[in-house]
Image (cartoon, helix red, strand yellow):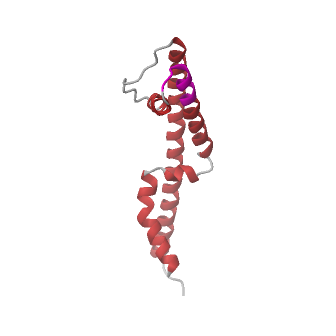
């Protein structure tokens, strides 16, 4: 009974789990990319805090907005060194997003393939005549 309950709970929360991308944190292949993203954001926060003399929150905010290519324009580098670092972060941000999207795609394709195999096997069982 408890196993049935845990399965139904997992099925209920699966869409939220996928939508929030929590399955990326569990996937062993995606973890190096997530570590790279965390290190890139941390390094950017330290650099922009030091170069541009911004607060920590503003530095992390600017780094995330730059890496994700959102670019609101409310913060921008004022120094030449800050502009050079921003160029580096913009290019790395695109590469990072492409790597993350590729891992999301791989996880979803793997899940879809497993589900498709389960459905196919079940349909084969139902359509095969019973052997006596």
Which residue appears farthest toward the top when viewing the image?
80
Q: Residue at x 54, y 44 (%)?
A: 103
Expressed as whole percent of the image width and height from the top left, the position of residue 14 reads 44, 60
Say left or right for 33 vs 94.
Answer: right
Q: Nearer the viewer, residue 69 or 83?
A: 83
Please state, as top left, top right, bottom left or bottom right, where the C terminus lies in the image: bottom right
Q: Say if 1 sits above or below 26 in the image.
A: below
Say left or right for 51 vs 70.
Answer: right
Expressed as whole percent of the image width and height from the top left, the position of residue 73 reads 37, 23
Q: Say if 31 sits above or below 60 in the image.
A: below
Expressed as whole percent of the image width and height from the top left, the position of residue 117 reads 51, 62
The quadrant in which residue 74 appears is top left
Dominant SS in magenta: helix
Say left or right for 65 vs 36.
Answer: left
Q: Say if 114 sits above or below 24 in the image.
A: below
Q: Say if 31 sits above or below 128 in the image.
A: above
Q: Residue at x 56, y 50 (%)?
A: 25
Q: Which region of the structure is painted magenta?
A: 44-54
Q: Nearer the viewer, residue 113 or 66?
A: 66
Q: Nearer the viewer, residue 1 or 45?
A: 45
Expressed as whole percent of the image width and height from the top left, the position of residue 63 reads 49, 29
Q: Magenta span has 113?
A: no
Q: Magenta span has 46?
A: yes
């Amino acid at each position: 009974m408890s196993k049935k309950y845990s399965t139904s709970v997992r099925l209920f929360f699966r869409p939220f789990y996928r939508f929030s991308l929590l399955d990326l944190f569990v996937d062993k292949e995606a973890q190096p990319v997530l570590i790279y993203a965390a290190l890139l954001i941390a390094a950017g926060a330290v650099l922009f805090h030091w170069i541009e003399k911004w607060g920590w929150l503003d530095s992390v905010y600017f780094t995330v907005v730059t890496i994700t290519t959102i670019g609101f324009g409310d913060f921008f580098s004022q120094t030449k060194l800050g502009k050079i670092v921003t160029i580096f972060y913009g290019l790395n941000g695109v590469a990072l997003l492409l790597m993350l999207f590729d891992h999301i795609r791989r996880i979803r394709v793997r899940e879809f393939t497993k589900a498709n195999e389960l459905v196919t096997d079940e349909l084969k069982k139902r359509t095969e005549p019973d052997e006596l």
